[in-house]
Image (tube, grey):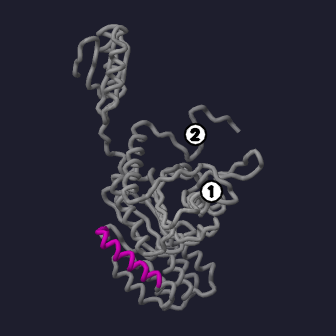
Amino acid sequence: MSKPKFFEKPTGLKDYLPEAVAKLRNIEFNVLDCMERWGYSQIITPALEFYDTVGAASSTEDRKLFKLLDRKGKTLVLRSEMTAPIARVVSSLLKDYKFPLRLSYHSNVFRAIEEEAGRDSEFFQTGVELVGDASSEADAEVVALAIASLQAAGVQTFKIALGHVGFLNGLFHETLTNREDAQKSLKACLLNRDYVGYREMLQSLQLEAGVEKELQGVLRFRGGLEICEQARAVTGDPTAQDAIRHLQEVWNVLKAYGVSEHVVIDLTMIGDFSYYTGMTFEGYASDLGFPVCGGGRYDNLLAQFGRPAPATGFALKTNRILEVIGKEAIEPPYRVLIAYDEAHREEALQCAKEIRTREGVAVVTRLVSSEASLESEIELLEDEHYLVQGVIYGDVITMV
């Protein structure tokens, strides 16, 4: 095996240059500020967790976890998502805190992805968890906050697709009783948005004509509140009926928030995490084919850590949001060059100290020996994409 070159990086990892970092930080700060104004407090968890606890509880497939051993031989994992680590903290360090708990975070997460174009092994998430509230009001709150967060991040045009795992679970239980493999295969097709494969799978199951038509019709269950009434008519399964009723309640709360125009109901959605137990949703920007946020209800996860509680939440996919707004320029700070000679060093550095206390100002200092040297410094900074706004040299202040 050849030795990697010094400038090479592992597959799926990337460097972020200053301009991209500025945009990432801008997204992060604006979104966390939005979440704080909704009453969510930020939490930080370690990048490494024990495989037997958080790793096993995570929804990420085992083969996609980065694993390593500590000195005692225990298996550790790099966190692959944030929900399971927060569930651990809620059940331990926050065990004496009363519900509901509103927590926010911004973190990098890691997944071992096979070599595919455009897939990252490390990416950033900014999200919230609302723990201890099982109501439709709580589900609607996190959807409304996801909408507010996308707007705070600078995403102008997007849609939130809202679903519920109970609908398909109930419908498939009713129509495909004792055919768990078939149910699993159909769900996999829907999860991957493989509608051609879904239809082909239905045909291969040799179902009664009426049942096959009913399951084919699921693909049309996408739209406004009227979709719920259409879905209610095709199944009498109690689980499916409860799911539809819950979505109607969530929709009505979102309408009260004034954000229902951003939402579509999509009953083909099942969520990409195995621990989802109820409502799920994904957010799509108009000019990007991948979701920029996702979330849902997970009422069984905290029981694995010894503190059973209902919970719901979401995460923004910050890297993908960067792709959406990446072409938009961020206004740079007002940049000041303070150039000085040895005789005026103390005066110049004290001046730089004072100017750096001002909001939105960046200061660069340079020791120069002559005005000619000063001119070369200005040219150098301009070449480095600095916007040189002011110069102090000796006793003279010159605006450039």
| Residue 247 highlighted magenta (yes or no) | yes
Q: Amino acid at mark 1?
A: Lys
Q: Is residue 390 above or below residue 67?
A: above
Callouts 1 and 2 close, C-beta under 8 Å: no
Residue drawn at 56 percent across, 50 percent down: 121
Mark 2, residue position: 9
Q: Is residue 122 above or below residue 363?
A: below
| Residue 304 highlighted magenta (yes or no) | no
Mark 1, residue position: 64
Residue drawn at 28 percent across, 69 percent down: 258
Count the marks: 2
Judged from this view, the residue extending furthest toward the left is 399
**Gap between marks 1 and 2 measured at Cα:** 19 Å
Work out whether residue 185 or residue 227 is closer to the camera in this orientation and state it.
Answer: 227
Drawn side of residue 50 relative to residue 42, left or right: right
Residue 188 appears in view: no
Residue drawn at 23 percent across, 17 percent down: 397
Q: Give the x, y percent position of residue 116.
A: 55, 52
Work out whether residue 194 or residue 157 is closer to the camera in this orientation and state it.
Answer: 157
Q: Is residue 390 above or below residue 160?
A: above
Drawn side of residue 259 relative to residue 70, left or right: left
Q: Identify the secondary structure beneath mark 2.
A: loop
Specify the segment rendered in magenta.
242-259
Q: Quadrant of residue 377?
A: top left
Q: Give the x, y percent position of residue 240.
A: 49, 84
Badge 2 density bin: few <14, some 14–19, many ≥20, Cα 10 Å:
few
Drawn side of residue 9 relative to residue 137, left or right: right
Disc sitting over residue 13 in the figure: none
Q: Amino acid at mark 2?
A: Lys
Badge 1 density bin: few <14, some 14–19, many ≥20, Cα 10 Å:
some
Could you tell me which quadrant the N terminus lies in? top right
